[in-house]
Amino acid sequence: MKITCDVCMHHCKLEEGQAGACLARRNAGNRILCENYGMATSLALDPIEKKPLRMFRPGSRILSVGSFGCNLKCPFCQNHGISMADKKKAESVTGTVYLPPEELAGKALEYKRFGNAGVAFTYNEPLVGWEYVCDTAKLVKEAGMDNVLVTNGSVSLWVLEEVLPYVDAMNIDLKGFRDEHYRKLGGDLGTVKAFIERAVKDCHVELTTLAVTGVNDKEEEMEEEAAWIAALEARTGKKIPLHVTRFFPHYRMTDREATPAAHVYRLAETAGKYLDHVFVGNC
């Protein structure tokens, strides 16, 4: 019998044993199983600026954890070894370690003496395994520490409502401002905009746009994006920093030239006509 996974905009209708588009959720016994629950492929104590977050706990570190799976298929993905992997592939390529919520929260508290502010769920798309994010984030908050979410924002709003009470800051990928660009990635711009609009109300949000050569690097597109962010700032009274990041050839786009650094700075200047806080990355 087919059952529907409603975690994201794909609404995958899955036969018994079939995995969804994210490769992390599966129909097992006519229920949706989160296969990447607690399965860590990456763990590092990072500078918080690497998330990137520039206006949340600057100078601190954050214990960053990743698993496997993602519900987008970006041809420029920096972490495709885990984000485009299912459980079997993740285990063979990078290895996985079971890290229950209690253990991860305990590590976060242990590393507080090294300047750790809490836990960041990152590297792959964390919300395809939102149950683990929620269970762990509750414990991290109980320990008096913060939670950070690095996400593509391509999930249903009910998932956001589940995790939002426990999340202190997010960096959300806004991968462009054209519907057709998102469709090519297997996503939906409207879903991401709705996610951002809701998240901004209750936590600190910073946005990142990777400027990909010849794809989403037009100045007029950046102007539209920045104007939309500025209007959201005006409605909510919140400042929303934007990171404009330089693209380098990677994964399935190794034949494309890196975005010229000068052009990334021009895009940042364009955004700066509307926004007070614009940062350039990878230049």
Image (cartoon, helix red, strand yellow):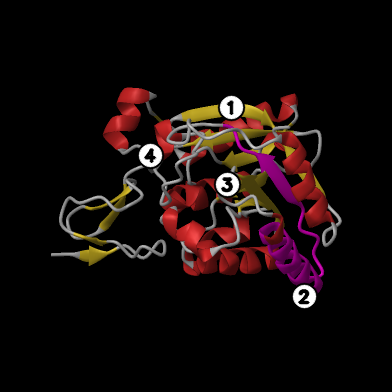
Q: Is residue 104 above or below residue 92?
A: below
Q: Is residue 142 above or below residue 31?
A: above
N-terminal-most mark, 1 or 4 = 1
Provide the secondary structure element on which disc 3 rests: loop
Tell me the mark number nearer the camera, choosing from 3 and 4. 3
Tell me the amino acid under the disc marked 2: Arg
Between 197 and 129, the one nearer to me in the picture: 197
Q: Which mark is residue 279?
A: none
Range shown magenta: 221-248
N-terminal-most mark, 1 or 2 = 1
The answer, for residue 55, to whether it is visible in the render is no
**Extreme-left residue of the structure:** 1
Provide the secondary structure element on which disc 2 rests: helix
Between 41 and 153, the one nearer to me in the picture: 153
The answer, for residue 94, to whether it is visible in the render is yes
When asked about the image quadrant of residue 167, the answer is: bottom right
Which residue carries the number 2 mark? 235
Are dots 3 and 4 in contact, CB under 8 Å? no
Q: Which mark is residue 44?
A: 1
Are dots 1 and 2 in contact, CB under 8 Å? no
Q: Is residue 112 above or below residue 202?
A: above
Are dots 3 and 1 in contact, CB under 8 Å? no
Q: Is residue 222 above or below residue 41?
A: below
Residue drawn at the location 41% of the way across and 31% of the way down: 81
Tell me the amino acid under the disc marked 4: Met
Tell me the mark number nearer the camera, choosing from 1 and 2. 2
Which residue carries the number 4 mark? 84
**Percent x, y of residue 158:** 48, 68
Which residue carries the number 3 mark? 214
**Percent x, y of residue 191:** 51, 66
